[in-house]
Image: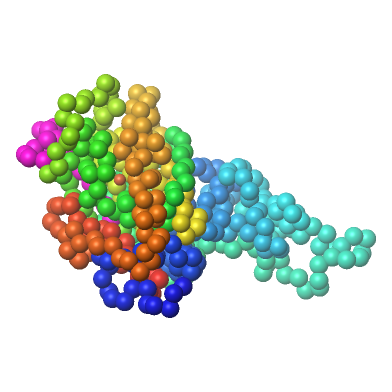
Amino acid sequence: MSTAPLWPDDDVSRVPYRVYTDPDIHAREQERIFRGPTWNFLCLEAEIPNPGDYRTSVIGDASIIVVRGRDGGIAALVNRCAHKGALVCYKPRGTVSEFTCVYHNWTYDLDGSLTGVAFRRGVRGEGGMEEGFEPGAHGLQRLRTASRNGLVFATFSDEAPDLETYIGPAMLAAMDRVFVKPVRVLGYHSQLLPSNWKLYAENTKDSYHATLLHVFHNTFGIVRFTMGGGISLSENGWHHLSFTERAADGSEREGAEAVRSLKEQYALEDPSLMEHRLELGDRITNSIQTIFPTLVVQQILNALAVRQLVPTGPEECELRWTVLGFEDDDEALEALRLKVNNLVGPAGYVSMEDGCIGGFIETATRSAPEGRSFMRMGGTAIEPAGASRVTEAAVRGFWRAWRDCMAL
Ligand SMILES: [Fe+2]
């Protein structure tokens, strides 16, 4: 790291470009954010319904096993054998009665406690583990774990407040709005992004770009700034919600549009792509919520999903999508969800640009580590400006969270 102070002032609207490339900053994030006082989304309870069901996930660069215990509770265990540090689970999911490391067959119970060491007492009275070996001191590292309406989170930190306090009442209400009943996983996408993870985190909090970068939005009208809606932030600015609402009379195009579509003559050949069955008790067509650091909860029409952002290196990350429906969906609704999902994912009509734009920034800022961005839409405040979504308040909130954790 250069010896110059990274961020010489308190201005979170001017982000130093070095944060997108510097390997030392990336390493510090692992320690201070991902293994620091944050709650990290891991998976859905619906993915591990029965005792012994597990799946692997990640928190920063740490591989994590999430497993349903015999008592129905959920444990998050660091996926690293206490013997030599090997991965214990190398498959993404499965059902087991115990975990066995393939290297030397050390075995662990579903709660992570060490239950067996191969050749512990040696062979024919010779060799074996040292005297006084205490299996109780050599389990898999177990993390604090909490669930909210089927979403599983964990933290490495004893200092993090409980999950509900961490998320805060306003953002909990927004999360609960989507997870009103048991969900079912409809499928997964994964995409590798050619940019630092924070550029995607910023993108999801940046409602200003929605109708500008995503021409589909402006042409076919999922999100226009003339529609109702707004932005809200958690009290500390760390988490955010941005939503768009259909007018009560069903119209979506009121008044003059701030940015006119260049393609007014265009119409979808199959308008059912944009069909929306109202199902959450309101008229919200589009709701994007972020929980710092790496969770996105998405409702775009009937396309429900969670996205987990995985920082894989200073200049790359992976975005993992889990596409959802409800357990009680009828066939027609499930078919509608799958169709509307063409809007999102790696090649989605309104999200493919998001996968690429971070790479544009990564490429262009690499040569200017001392440069800084200028994100003053809505000024420098971290509060939303009335009902306007033409603000970068939530992006500034992200940087508040990052600086709180990083102490930089
Ligand atoms: Fe976007």
Q: Main secondary structure of the magenta part?
A: loop
Determine the residue positioned at 37% across, 59% down: 365
Q: Position of residue 263 (x, y in %)?
A: 19, 31
Q: Is residue 20 visible?
A: no
Q: Would you say residue 281 sits in the magenta stretch?
A: no
Q: Position of residue 388 (x, y in %)?
A: 15, 52
Lateral position of residue 336 relative to residue 309, left or right = left
| Residue at the farthest front position | 367
Determine the residue positioned at 46% across, 38% down: 188
Q: Position of residue 268 (x, y in %)?
A: 25, 24
Indicate whether 61 appears above or below 192: below
Q: Nearer the viewer, residue 362 or 159?
A: 362
Residue 254 location, quadrant: top left
Lateral position of residue 224 relative to residue 113, left or right = left
Q: Nearer the viewer, residue 403 or 286?
A: 403
Q: Position of residue 403 (x, y in %)?
A: 35, 70
Lateral position of residue 109 relative to residue 363, left or right = right
Counting labels gives 0
Determine the residue positioned at 41% across, 39% down: 346
Q: Is residue 368 visible?
A: yes
Q: Nearer the viewer, residue 85 or 114?
A: 85
Q: Magenta span covers which residues?
A: 240-257
Q: Which corner quadrant of the figure contains ligand 1?
A: top left
| Residue at the farthest left position | 255
**Position of the C terminus by quadrant:** bottom left
| Residue at the farthest top position | 269
**How is colour applied across the structure in the image?**
rainbow
Q: Would you say residue 250 sits in the magenta stretch?
A: yes
Determine the residue positioned at 39% across, 39% down: 345
